[in-house]
């Protein structure tokens, strides 16, 4: 989650300098956990509380690596990936310290080992990144790849709850580190490996992002056998099966789940839908509205269309494109209220809608539209 690796005397000196500037008003950890959205994002490092909401746009590791740590203690991940020059910058965001914490002697509590449904340890353990070697890279389209990565043991599951994601970390061209979140398209019934379907943002294609995507290009350049650092799992919404889910520690149950995805935001929606359809006993109804720029940009379309045909009473899929080809039978243009009325379940107390995509697409555009047509804000969530 950051720009460089460092430790030792310089870090201690930076921490001392930082400590002189930071407020010490006590903040309960229960309050920290409430601030887990892009609009209000708090983290804890070495017992101190930081409001990093305004740091998201300029954070060297990207906003995603901050968001996955929202409302949590991220001491281990932060200190392993940031050098001494970051501490004075971080001091600008300090708003207090965790109530009851002794910062000078702060030691992150050791987490309990995580096991899968079979009782065996899963690959991803708390605060312990792993290295996974590339097994294969398949070209799905000119700018989309399907990556398969090897886990440490052949009988081991990755250990990602349904609806959660992982964090990949790699060195960038300048020697720093870059971090990005991705949702596996395989579930934990897959052993010994996991799969990611990723859109590669190439350099020189989009004038708004002339350098392209640092992480996606890094992944595309990996050779079979090369390793990438994987950590997690991260997330605040988990599908438990049979319509039951957990959201920020609170349990809920849905009769129907709607999903609205923009671009590569399809992967967590895909993961949940796959888990539901793979279980014949799960009668939760799913609706998907998937927005893209062009028809060629639609990730995982083959699988989605096959599911919709095979399970017409359990899944409804609809697409909308910014630029549609001749003969296009789905929608064209931005998501509208009429589109949501036609292709999302009717609002109700047991109807929930999950969204994933660019922040403006999700929070500024789609969520207000959902509320306008009768969905309760508490019945919407973002991955």
Image: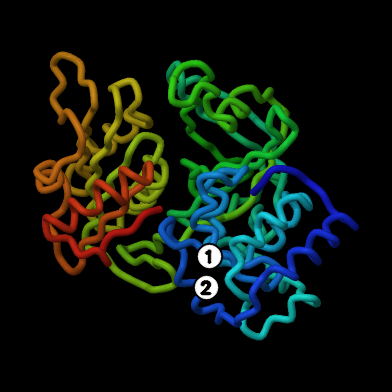
Relative horizontal placement of residue 204, taking residue 270 as reference (left or right): right
Q: CA distance from mark 1 to mark 2?
A: 6 Å
Where residue 102 sits, quadrant-wise, is: bottom right
Relative horizontal placement of residue 59, taking residue 34 as reference (left or right): right
Q: Residues within 10 Å of mark 2 (few under 14, many from 20)?
A: many
Residue 260 visible in image: yes
Measured as percent of width and height from the top left, residue 226 is found at 72, 29
Q: Which mark is residue 42?
A: 1
Numbered-mark total:
2
Q: How is the image coloured?
A: rainbow
At numbered mark 1, what does the secondary structure look like: helix, strand or loop?
strand
Q: Earlier in the sequence, mark 1 or mark 2?
A: 2
Residue at the (49%, 32%) spot, across then down: 198
* Dot 1 and dot 2 residues touching (CB under 8 Å): yes
Measured as percent of width and height from the top left, residue 214 is found at 59, 30
Where residue 149 sits, quadrant-wise, is: top right
Residue bearing the label numbered 2: 32
Residue 189 visible in image: no
């Amino acid at each position: 989650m950051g720009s460089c690796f460092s430790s030792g005397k310089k870090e201690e000196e930076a921490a001392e300098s930082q400590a002189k500037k930071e407020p010490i008003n006590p903040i309960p950890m229960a309050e920290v956990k409430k601030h887990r959205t892009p609009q209000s994002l708090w983290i804890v490092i070495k017992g101190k509380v930081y409001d990093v909401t305004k740091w998201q746009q300029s954070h060297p590791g990207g906003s995603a690596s901050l968001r996955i740590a929202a409302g949590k203690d991220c001491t281990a991940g932060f200190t392993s990936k940031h050098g001494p020059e970051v501490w004075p910058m971080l001091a600008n965001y300090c708003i207090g310290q965790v109530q009851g914490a002794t910062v000078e002697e702060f030691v992150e509590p050791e987490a309990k080992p995580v096991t899968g449904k079979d009782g065996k340890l899963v690959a991803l353990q708390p605060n312990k990144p792993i290295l996974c070697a590339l097994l294969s890279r398949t070209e799905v389209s000119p700018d989309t790849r399907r990556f398969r990565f090897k886990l440490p043991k052949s009988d081991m599951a990755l250990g990602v709850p349904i609806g959660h994601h992982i964090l990949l970390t790699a060195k960038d061209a300048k020697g720093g580190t870059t971090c990005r979140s991705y949702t596996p398209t395989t579930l934990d019934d897959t052993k010994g490996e996991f799969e990611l379907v990723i859109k590669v943002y190439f350099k020189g294609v989009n004038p708004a992002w002339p350098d392209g995507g640092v992480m996606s290009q890094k992944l595309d350049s990996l050779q079979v056998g090369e390793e990438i650092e994987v950590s997690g799992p991260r997330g605040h919404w988990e599908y438990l099966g049979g319509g039951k889910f957990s959201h920020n520690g609170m349990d809920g149950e849905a009769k129907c789940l709607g999903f609205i995805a923009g671009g590569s935001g399809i992967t967590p929606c895909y993961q949940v839908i796959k888990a539901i359809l793979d279980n014949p006993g799960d009668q939760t109804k799913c609706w998907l509205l998937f927005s893209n720029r062009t028809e060629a940009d639609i990730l995982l379309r083959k699988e989605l269309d096959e599911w919709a045909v095979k399970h017409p009473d359990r899944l409804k899929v609809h697409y909308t494109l910014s630029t549609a080809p001749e003969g296009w039978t789905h929608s064209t243009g931005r998501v509208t209220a009429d589109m949501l009325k036609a292709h999302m379940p009717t609002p109700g107390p047991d109807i929930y809608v999950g969204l994933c995509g660019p922040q403006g697409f999700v929070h500024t555009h789609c969520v207000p539209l959902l509320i306008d047509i009768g969905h309760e804000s508490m019945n919407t969530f973002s991955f």
